[in-house]
Amino acid sequence: MTLPAYPAARAVAPTVYEHFARHTAEAQSRGDHVVSALPDTAAIEAMIDAAFWASLRREESYVPKISLAFLAPDHTGHPLIFEQPLALDAASLVRLAPAVERAGIHLGVWRRNGELIVWGTAHAIPTLCLVIEVAAPGLLVVKHHRGEEAAKYVNVAVLEGDQIKVVDEQSTSTPPDCPSLLSSLLGFDSPGTWVSSVNLLVQLAVSMRAHGRGGLLLVVPAAGERWHESIVQPIQYAIAPAFGQLALLNRDAPEVKRTRAWQDEVSRVVASIAGLTAVDGATVMTTDYDVLAFGAKISRKKGSPQVEQVAVTEPIQGGAATTQHPTQLGGTRHLSAAQFVHDQHDAVALVASQDGRFTVFAWSECEETVHAHRVEALLM
């Protein structure tokens, strides 16, 4: 049975192609060795289409978790190659899903005799390799690798049903006074930030979102105690001395940070800190990555007005800024985070919702208001 075409696949394929063509050309102009083959629009459309229909099926009641990568077997090390390649269709992908649901395993897609086939699996993929990931039923993420093994992938587009969100690489929705901390989280400051090091704040955000319980992380200045003015005292889970393992790892030499042992240790520590955010209340961490408390209750600073509205943007093409009450973004966590940033202008609040949404609150000097950045499209 031939499934109907997924309209969003055809609509987004040219945009995705332009992204990969542009970045491939830029890499070649810099003299970078580009291994990944540039996928054409037909291949992009076919991969998205097959992944979408597979996402709506079940394999023994399980939702399939699949990652498709457009690469030839000789573009990866130690590939697992099927003696008989499989067709790129929903039925084949669903049957393979149990074998490839763990993170870091990709189904390799390539052309043979003019037809797209699934040739096997790959663990390592080159930079700028097109990846289509099934995140949930009807929810797909188009992405590629940044170049560092431990760095998060670059999200190009997110498709949910008939909704298409293309990431705005030019950050046109980001205010001119966007804090450097937030710029780094969004990945808009410099490609070098990702190629040369692991962004710890992004790893924390991804881990907070992954545990699925919702969470709130307050990032406060390393020097100063003013943030206490916005926290109910005493703090039930204050940490003394501060938990500084992530701060110590961040101070390691660049050559140490490139080792697998360092990356594994960072992942372990990040997961432990993200776990603290699942406790009711806020986790407090300094800009130097020292953890000061968790389960902290936010209160309005004495004499400060209650926050009534925030500017809301999402870093996607065509995303227009809106003004909303904080409760329109979520529940108590969002309102508390907005109030904290309203009272503590030098702080940033990261809020993960149980449904996967992720919002970064920061004070905008030029707008003189709290700015809420919806960034889940970057974190999937």
Image (cartoon, rainbow, N blue to C red):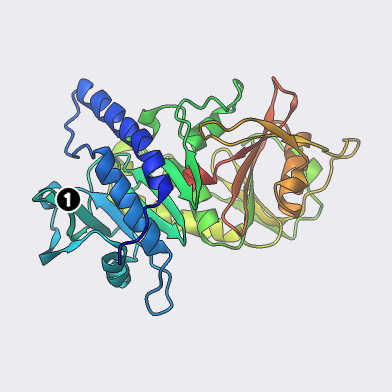
Residue beneath the point at 27% across and 24% down: 26
Question: Residue 232 appears at what percent x and percent y?
Answer: 81, 52
Please identify the quarter of the rendering in which residue 218 is found: top right
User: Where is 200 relative to 265, above or below?
Assistant: above
Residue beneath the point at 30% across and 42% down: 148
Query: Does 233 sit left or right of 89 as displayed?
Result: right
Q: Which residue is mark 1?
A: 110
User: Where is 247 relative to 96, above or below?
Assistant: above
Query: Does 360 sit left or right of 61 as displayed?
Result: right
Question: Residue 190 appears at what percent x and percent y?
Answer: 41, 27
Does residue 247 appear in the picture of this structure? no
Helix, strand or loop under label 1? strand
Task: Specify the farthest residue to the bottom.
Answer: 60
Crowdedness of circle 1 by 10 Å Cα count: few (<14), some, many (20+)?
many
Residue beneath the point at 44% across and 29% down: 169
User: Where is 309 relative to 205, above or below?
Assistant: above
Task: Specify the farthest residue to the right.
Answer: 303
Please identify the quarter of the rendering in which residue 145 is found: top left
Question: Is the N terminus in the top left, top right, bottom left or bottom right quadrant?
Answer: bottom left
Question: Residue 347 appears at what percent x and percent y?
Answer: 67, 36
Query: Does 287 sit left or right of 281 as displayed?
Result: left
Q: How many marks?
A: 1
Query: Does 245 sit left or right of 364 as displayed?
Result: left
Residue beneath the point at 30% across and 62% down: 2
Question: Residue 265 appears at what percent x and percent y?
Answer: 38, 55
Residue placed most toward the observer, 222 or 310: 310
> Label 1 is placed on what type of residue?
Trp
Residue placed most toward the observer, 263 or 109: 109
User: Where is 355 relative to 289, above or below?
Assistant: below
Does residue 341 appear in the picture of this structure? yes
Residue placed most toward the observer, 197 or 311: 311
